[in-house]
Image (cartoon, rainbow, N blue to C red):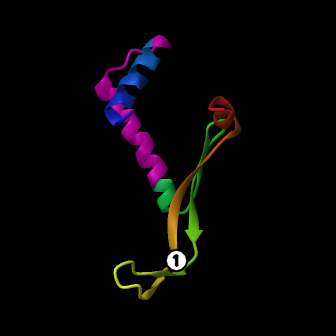
Amino acid sequence: MNKQDLVGALAEELKKQGVSITKKDTAVVLDAFLNVVQGELKKGGKVQLVGFGTFGVKKRAGRRGRNPQTGKEIRIPEAKVPFFRPGKGLRDLVK
């Protein structure tokens, strides 16, 4: 499912729940949600959606690696990486 498919599915789900919203407006809401999550992660925070999961940032330690072309050892610096940890409700749903 790509973003366009997700927007269509969200609009259909909202119609089932009695909320009349266009796909264009649904796309604006989805973009706003993504911007809020990205902004919080950029600040180093996390977003918890109970039953669904948690979006957060982890620090990955620096390590040594190898250049596959030359075989020479290189240092890979530490980095912050985003993660998603599914909640119990989501894990149970996909079992």
For badge 1, the amino acid type reads Glu
Give the percent coordinates (x, y) of residue 48.
Answer: 62, 45
* Residue farthest along the bottom direction in this orientation: 72
Question: Could you tell me which residue is drawn at 56 percent across and 71 percent down?
Answer: 60
Q: Tell me which corner region of the image, top left, top right, bottom left or bottom right, holds residue 8.
A: top left
Question: Could you tell me which residue is drawn at 47 percent across and 61 percent down?
Answer: 42
> Is residue 57 shown left or right of residue 72?
right
Q: Nearer the viewer, residue 92 or 31?
A: 92
* Residue 85 colored in magenta in the image: no
Which residues make up the magenta segment? 16-38
Q: Residues within 10 Å of mark 1 (few under 14, many from 20)?
A: few
Quarter of the picture containing the N terminus is: top left
* Residue 35 colored in magenta in the image: yes
Q: Nearer the viewer, residue 60 or 40?
A: 60
Give the percent coordinates (x, y) of residue 26.
Answer: 36, 28
Judged from the image, the secondary structure of the residue bearing numbered disc 1 is: loop
Residue under numbered circle 1: 78
Question: Could you tell me which residue is drawn at 34 percent across and 80 percent down?
Answer: 69
> Is residue 60 shown left or right of residue 26?
right
User: Number of labelled discs?
Assistant: 1
Give the percent coordinates (x, y) of residue 51.
Answer: 67, 35
Give the percent coordinates (x, y) of residue 95.
Answer: 66, 32
> Is residue 15 shown left or right of residue 49?
left
Q: Tell me which corner region of the image, top left, top right, bottom left or bottom right, holds residue 32.
A: top left
| Majority secondary structure in the magenta region | helix
47 relative to 6, above or below? below
6 relative to 71, above or below? above
* Residue farthest along the left direction in this orientation: 24
